[in-house]
Image (spheres, rainbow, N blue to C red):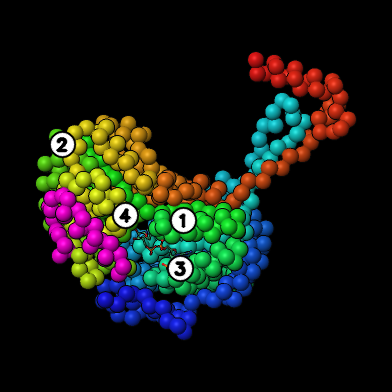
């Protein structure tokens, strides 16, 4: 079967509509020589951009955002063509991405302006200020599952913090990246504030090798480790947003109808290609039968090609096939089976009672597959939810115990009686722990992520006691020890 992307020896590659396999577009592979030039241009633009005030940067970013919103249908068409998702999903994705641009632009001054700190008793004569300094050039390496929303969580925040950005979209979905650059050039024609490089993984590696000042990566844990190793080699700081094996915990007092409805959507929407999508469900035995009944009935109304689109990356189909086979061998079929994994589309699959050690319970499937296991207590559900190398997000369904359960989950994000919504609340940090990555995008944490703190101190007046001089007196030593004794006794 032909993949949507093929790289030719002529330094070009093509993308194809995932739903039909039809050719969509041809792109150049950015060469090392070009990368060198692009990074130099970005560095010059970063100098100009970081010298602007927050208000000036906000004005430009909001102008860019207005242009994105005014031309949203163009963005939607490009996303649909290369990712294979339905128009409605692409519209929601693009609209939410614009919300993040708006928030980052509007709030940067609140979280990144200079802050004064108390100097403490010993240094009472000093003024102590912390500046947040943009890194300079931020390299954003993006995935194919949410080709505008996910990278925008880095692009908008890095720009609002005063950096220039070079974006390497996935080789499966480069069109939207080039469109974002084009829109930015209409607003800022004289500067290279947002540039896009195209190609496969080597181009991402080349971006790191050409000395950008920070990397923000989204994708698989395996690639994240390579990216991190390459960054460490050059002492480039990084933020890693990786995959998950997100659990759903359903307590005996849950609203089962809503829980089933939203868990189904969380697991199957976007053809299951969501890092924060439900993959494992732990349901309390008291309500398991009823929950499964509702889930089965709702799932039987869902169809690939109608409710969600094609699998974006053909190689993913092999992983999904392997996981379905593994789960079917060890568990019990409820909806769908091997035949649900087609040439381009995957029909919903629900399997129950799969042992915890199975591959399908441990590795990210990234397909419309849900595994539902029954637990005797919520303590058991919590222990099993945490028993994974991932720690991205989780969803908890309970009328009374949501907060209590959420507090015991080892992950970066929890939604109680809901799914996904933390990603749409721009002020909430997004990211995971363990194999799901490190660092945060979105919210104040996402703005801080694209700056480093610079501590600046200055005497407001001079004390008769000099602590930082070879002329320090015995009296100064006595003052230090006496103050220490009084304060810390
Ligand atoms: P990858 O992690 O390989 O790719 C993510 C991005 O990194 C892409 O832009 C990719 O380029 C780039 N890249 C690849 N190799 C390197 C490298 N050595 N240095 C720098 N950049 C590099 O994801 P895949 O597309 O291979 O998907 C594999 C799995 O990852 C999926 O099965 C899924 O489980 C998971 N995934 C998770 C996502 C999430 O949101 N957490 C998103 C996407 C995938 P290119 O693709 O152009 O080769």
* Left or right of 448, for residue 404: left
Q: Nearer the viewer, mark 3 or mark 2?
A: 3
Q: Label 3 crowding class (10 Å Cα cut-off): few <14, some 14-19, many 20+?
A: some
Q: Give me the C-alpha separation between circle 3 and circle 2.
A: 45 Å
Mark 2 / mark 4, whichever is N-terminal: 2
The residue carrying mark 3 has its beta carbon less than 8 Å from ligand 1:
yes
Are the residues flagged by discs 3 and 1 in contact, CB closer than 8 Å?
A: no
Whether 10 is drawn above or below 50: the answer is below
Are the residues flagged by discs 3 and 2 in contact, CB closer than 8 Å?
A: no
Residue wearing tag 3: 201
Question: What residue lies at 56% left-to-right and 60% top-to-bottom?
Answer: 138
Which residue range is magenta in the image?
314-340
* Left or right of 335, for residue 475: right
The residue carrying mark 1 has its beta carbon less than 8 Å from ligand 1:
no
Q: Which element carries disc 2, helix, strand or loop?
A: helix
Res. 364 mark: 4
Image quarter of the N terminus:
bottom left
Residue wearing tag 1: 225
Mark 2 / mark 1, whichever is N-terminal: 1
Q: Which element carries disc 4, helix, strand or loop?
A: loop
Q: Nearer the viewer, residue 400 or 410?
A: 410
Image quarter of the C terminus:
top right
* Left or right of 450, for residue 252: left
Residue 15 lies within the magenta run = no
Q: Give me the C-alpha separation between circle 2 and circle 4.
A: 25 Å
Q: Nearer the viewer, residue 191 or 329?
A: 329
């Amino acid at each position: 079967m032909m993949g949507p992307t093929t790289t030719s020896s002529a330094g070009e590659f093509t993308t194809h509509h995932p739903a039909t396999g039809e050719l969509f577009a041809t792109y150049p592979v950015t060469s090392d020589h070009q990368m060198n030039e692009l990074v130099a241009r970005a560095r010059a633009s970063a100098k100009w951009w970081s010298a602007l005030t927050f208000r000036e940067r906000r004005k430009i970013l909001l102008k860019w955002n207005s242009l994105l919103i005014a031309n949203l249908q163009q963005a939607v068409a490009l996303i649909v063509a290369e990712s294979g998702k339905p128009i409605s999903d692409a519209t929601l994705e693009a609209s939410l991405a614009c919300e993040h641009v708006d928030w980052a632009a509007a709030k940067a001054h609140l979280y990144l302006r200079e802050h004064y700190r108390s100097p403490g008793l010993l240094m009472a004569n000093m003024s102590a200020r912390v500046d947040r300094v943009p890194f300079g050039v931020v390299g954003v390496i993006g995935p194919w599952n949410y080709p505008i929303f996910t990278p925008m969580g880095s692009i908008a925040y890095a720009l609002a913090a005063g950096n220039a950005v070079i974006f390497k979209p996935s080789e499966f979905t480069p069109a939207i990246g080039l469109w974002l650059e084009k829109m930015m050039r209409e607003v800022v024609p004289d500067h290279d504030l947002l540039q896009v490089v195209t190609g496969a993984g080597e181009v991402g590696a080349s971006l790191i090798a050409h000395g950008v000042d920070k990397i923000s990566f989204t994708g698989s844990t395996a690639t994240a480790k390579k990216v991190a190793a390459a960054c460490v080699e050059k002492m480039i700081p990084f933020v890693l947003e990786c995959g998950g094996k997100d659990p759903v915990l359903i307590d005996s007092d849950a609203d089962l109808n809503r829980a089933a409805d939203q868990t189904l959507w969380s697991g199957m929407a976007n053809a299951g290609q969501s890092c924060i999508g439900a993959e494992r469900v732990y349901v309390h035995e008291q309500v398991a039968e009823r929950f499964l009944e509702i889930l089965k009935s709702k799932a039987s109304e869902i169809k690939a090609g109608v409710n969600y689109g094609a699998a974006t990356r053909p190689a993913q189909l092999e992983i999904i096939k392997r996981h379905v086979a593994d789960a079917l061998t060890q568990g019990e079929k409820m909806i769908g089976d091997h035949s649900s994994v087609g040439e381009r589309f995957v029909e919903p699959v629900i399997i129950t009672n799969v042992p915890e050690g199975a591959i399908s319970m441990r590795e990210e499937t990234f397909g419309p597959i849900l595994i539902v296991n029954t637990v005797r207590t919520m303590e058991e559900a919590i222990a099993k939810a945490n028993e994974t190398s991932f720690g991205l997000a989780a969803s908890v369904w309970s009328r009374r115990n949501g907060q209590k359960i959420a507090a015991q989950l080892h992950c970066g994000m929890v939604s109680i009686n809901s799914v996904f919504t933390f990603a749409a609340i721009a002020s909430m940090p997004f990211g995971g722990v363990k194999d799901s990555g490190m660092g945060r995008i979105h919210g104040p944490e996402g703005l801080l992520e694209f700056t480093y703190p610079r501590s600046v101190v200055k005497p407001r007046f001079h004390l008769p006691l000099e602590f930082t001089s070879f002329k320090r007196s015995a009296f100064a030593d006595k003052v230090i020890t006496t103050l220490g004794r009084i304060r810390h006794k």
